[in-house]
């Protein structure tokens, strides 16, 4: 199956700093990438949908100025958590697809963010 | 309200025994239905999906799921579990308009030798 990588796998930062997470589709060109957040022992929550070359679409309740998404190419999307606070600590997961939510998504292994 | 429910947080089965993981949904119309598996350190992997047609869906790794409209359920089954099946399993739905994806809370499967 297709491979999606995320970098870094784990990051610890101080409160007030910004953190960038990269999501790459390694062996295919993804028209759409999705960003999820997973709280401990809870489900995944879709944060935003990102299409190459256009602005991301954010789910209700997700602050677009807090979670900046850039989809620079068909193989790379980045999520920047700006001015991070402890409540932003979470597991962030990306997925890549050729199409929409209902098409097969290939998930990255996730990034554990801890904000001190 | 639209929702996905996995009633069992944690299930333990013996190796070789059969498995059924439950999933119920509440949506205005029949959504697209998925089962994913998440192993530690790895990304979610699609096991199977249902869009329409035959209500019994075959997936990878010997899994199958049955869509029952009358019960709003999409339960995952496997006739004989292996130790390598120990993981977290998520049921997910996508709205008929191809938006609004929701995941269940997950069921953690432990396999006893």
Image (spheres, coloured by chain):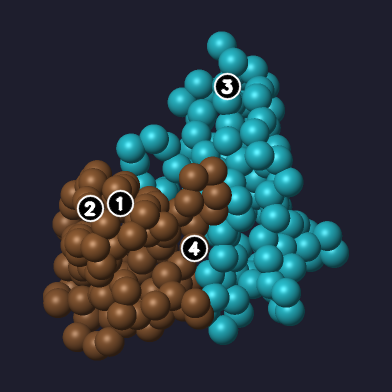
Colour in which chain B is drawn: cyan
Q: Mark 4 against mark 3, which lies toward the viewer?
A: 4
Q: Is residue A45 above or below residue B76?
A: below
Marks 1 and 2 share the same chain: yes
First in sequence: mark 1 vs mark 2: 2
Q: CA distance from mark 1 to mark 3?
A: 34 Å
Q: Position of residue A20 (x, y in %)?
A: 19, 62
Q: CA distance from mark 2 to mark 4?
A: 24 Å
Q: Which residue is mark 2?
A: A14
Give the chain letter for brown.
A
Kindly indicate the quadrant of the structure image that contains residue B78.
Answer: top right
Q: CA distance from mark 1 to mark 2?
A: 6 Å
CB atoms of marks 1 and 3 within 8 Å: no
Number of the label disc, if any, that sits on residue B22: none
* SS class, disc 3: strand
Q: Mark 1 against mark 3, which lies toward the viewer?
A: 1
What is the chain identity of the residue bearing mark 2? A
Number of the label disc, if any, that sits on residue B111: 3
What is the chain identity of the residue bearing mark 4? A
| Disc 3 crowd, CA 10 A, few/some/many (<14, 14-19, 20+) | some
Q: Nearer the viewer, residue A21 or B102?
A: A21
* SS class, disc 1: strand
On screen, residue B90 versus residue A77, left or right, reads right
Q: Residue furthest right?
A: B70
Q: Position of residue B110 (x, y in %)?
A: 57, 25
Q: Mark 2 against mark 4, which lies toward the viewer?
A: 2
Q: Which residue is mark 4?
A: A45
């Amino acid at each position: 199956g297709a491979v999606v990588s995320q970098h870094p796998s784990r990051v610890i930062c101080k409160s007030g700093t910004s953190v960038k997470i990269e999501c790459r589709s390694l062996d295919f060109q993804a028209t759409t990438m999705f960003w999820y957040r997973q709280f401990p022992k809870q489900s995944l929550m879709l944060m935003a949908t990102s299409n190459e070359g256009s602005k991301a679409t954010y789910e209700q309740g997700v602050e677009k100025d807090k979670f900046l998404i850039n989809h620079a190419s068909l193989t790379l999307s980045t999520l920047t958590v700006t001015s991070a606070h402890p409540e932003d600590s979470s597991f962030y997961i990306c997925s890549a697809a050729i199409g929409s939510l209902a098409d097969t998504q290939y998930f990255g292994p996730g990034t554990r963010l801890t904000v001190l | 309200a639209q929702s996905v429910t996995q009633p069992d947080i944690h299930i333990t089965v013996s190796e070789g025994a059969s498995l059924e993981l439950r999933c119920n949904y509440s949506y205005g119309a029949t959504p697209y239905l998925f089962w994913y598996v998440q192993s530690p350190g790895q990304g979610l992997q699609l096991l199977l999906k249902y869009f329409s047609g035959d209500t019994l869906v075959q997936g990878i790794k010997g899994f199958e799921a049955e869509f029952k409209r009358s019960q709003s359920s999409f339960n995952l089954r496997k006739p004989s579990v292996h130790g390598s099946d120990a993981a977290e399993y998520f049921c997910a739905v996508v709205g008929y308009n191809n938006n609004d994806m929701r995941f269940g809370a997950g069921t953690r499967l432990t396999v006893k030798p």
